Image: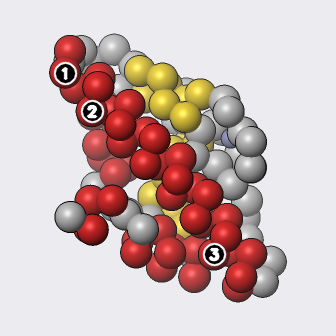
Amino acid sequence: MDEEKQARVAESESMFRDVNERIQMSHEQWGGAEPQEFLCECEELGCAEHTELTLEEYEAIRADPTKFAILPGHQISSVERVVEEHDRFWVVEKIGSAGEVAEARDPRTLE
Ligand SMILES: [Zn+2]
């Protein structure tokens, strides 16, 4: 995968993450330790599937701007590597330029 495509792919993932940030904020208003639905943050354009994470799990992933929560098996090995495998979701870490884009686009570091 070339650099330009990597960057585009990371852009789309960052967009999903923006949506998930809003989902997370609305969940926080009523709290709860039960797993909530989040959008899968994989590379697949148009992937509208849901992962289920507790807020605690989501927060732990979001503490690192290069990490994303995806459905098991949705990783693309050329731009990311799986760092955690759980029953409901996997955690991937961006590598190379995709990681840099993800970091630059992190809504939490833009504030
Ligand atoms: Zn997916």
CB within 8 Å, label 2 to label 1: yes
Pinpoint residue 56: horizontal percent, then vertical percent: 27, 34
Category of crowding for the residue at label 1, using alpha-carbon neighbours closer than 10 angstroms: few (below 14), some (14–19), many (at least 20): few
Numbered label attached to residue 25? 2
* Residue corresponding to mark 3: 7
Inter-mark Cα distance, 2 to 1: 7 Å
Q: Amino acid at mark 3?
A: Ala
Q: Amino acid at mark 2?
A: Met
* Residue corresponding to mark 1: 29
- Is tag 3's residue or tag 1's residue first in the polypeptide sequence? 3
Please state, as top left, top right, bottom left or bottom right, where the C terminus lies in the image. Answer: bottom left
Task: Identify the residue at image location x=51%, y=63%.
Answer: 93
Q: Is residue 55 left or right of residue 98?
A: left
Q: 54 or 20: nearer the eye?
A: 20
Give above or below for 43 relative to 105.
Answer: above
Inter-mark Cα distance, 3 to 1: 34 Å
Task: Identify the residue at image location x=78%, y=83%.
Answer: 2
Give above or below for 43 relative to 66.
Answer: above
Secondary element under disc 1, as helix, strand or loop, is: helix
Task: Identify the residue at image location x=35%, y=26%.
Answer: 54
Q: Is residue 66 left or right of residue 6?
A: left
Category of crowding for the residue at label 2, using alpha-carbon neighbours closer than 10 angstroms: few (below 14), some (14–19), many (at least 20): few
CB within 8 Å, label 2 to label 3: no
Inter-mark Cα distance, 2 to 3: 27 Å
* Quadrant assignment for ligand 1: top right
Q: Amino acid at mark 1?
A: Gln
Q: Quadrant of residue 48?
A: top right
